[in-house]
Amino acid sequence: MTETVQRTFSPTPEEVAKFHERGYLGPFKVYEEDEMRRIWRRERLRLMNRDNAVYDEGDAQAGNTNIANYDRHLDSQFLADHICHPRIVDRVTAVLGPSVLCWRSEFFPKYPGDEGTDWHQADTFAFASGKPQILWPEEEKEFGGTITVWTAFTEAAEDTGCLQFIPGTHRTMFYDESKGMHYQPDKINESRKGDVNRGFYGYDYRDLQKDPDWRPPEERAISMVMRPGEAVMFWSTMMHASKPHSAMDKEMRLGFAGRYVPTCVAVYPDTDDVDEYGGRISLKDYGAVLVAGVDTYGHNRKVTATTRGYTFPAR
């Protein structure tokens, strides 16, 4: 009898300890660079077909941000495989435990000439819609948030808008998401003296600061330069931002983020739609994906296959 040995990509105990200390792990390789370029050339064309997407593009498109492109893993086989990729899931479960949901995915494009993304943290993701999108049970919550795995589908360099992190800031929230922000896509936010040109998709994230005079300790920031096919895993509660895309002769920088929580976390509690960035999407066809383990809680809507009938390969 032949046994199939499942290869694992779990980080070492030392790597896990460093993740808890810094708030991030990586970059690490998910795909070979040539493989990633080849895949993206194919998939970018396929993703233009929205016939099976779960959100209506006409209702959701708003300014520079298109929330209709949330959760394309629910209709794309490649993205379905990607959020369940063992090189990602094994690292996530090493931190969150054996039973994990992917509750959202997002594309983050940055075109030549685009501004950077302002410093921010996310705990319940209520800052735009006013409704918590994830809620940890009090007995399980250490500091909340979600684990984000951000994969570079194209080069993420200093001059194309790479991510920036301030290590060790994930255990203290400097922003109050309950304060809410006003969507003002035409407002020009004047940068603080010494800052690079940054914004936040039509919002001013500084409106959420608990102390209006507080400034992020940017002198501690590190740049997360990545080649196509590399990824980084980090807590959404860690201070993070991105640089502007200042290289006019280079391609769009494209990142794809999968967001993960343990099954004990309530996803979109008492919520039927999401209002963000001047648009609204209905959650009637939405479901979180169990990427590893079992769900003994049962309080979240889930799906086991894409809208095209492809079964998610749970770990």
Image: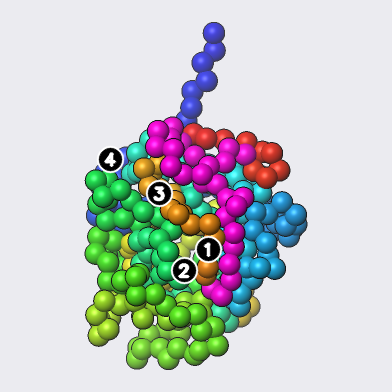
Q: Earlier in the sequence, mark 1 or mark 4?
A: 4
Seen from the viewer's position, the closer of residues 126 and 199 is 126
Residue topped by disc 1: 274
Disc 3 on helix, strand or loop? Answer: strand
Disc 2 on helix, strand or loop? Answer: loop
- Count how many numbered circles sit on residues in the image: 4
Q: Earlier in the sequence, mark 3 or mark 1?
A: 3
Disc 1 on helix, strand or loop? Answer: strand
Q: Is residue 28 above or below residue 85?
A: below
Q: What type is the residue that disc 3 sits on?
A: Ala
Q: Are marks 1 and 2 in contact (CB under 8 Å)?
A: yes
Residue topped by disc 4: 13
Seen from the viewer's position, the closer of residues 266 and 45 is 266
Residue topped by disc 3: 266
Q: What type is the residue that disc 4 sits on?
A: Pro
Q: Earlier in the sequence, mark 2 or mark 3?
A: 2
What is the C-alpha distance between the residues marked 3 and 1?
Answer: 15 Å
Discs 1/4, front: 1
Report the residue at 57% width, 41% height from top: 303
Residue topped by disc 2: 129
Q: Look at the image and give the residue range highlighted in magenta.
A: 277-305
Dominant secondary structure, magenta: loop
Q: Is residue 2 visible?
A: yes
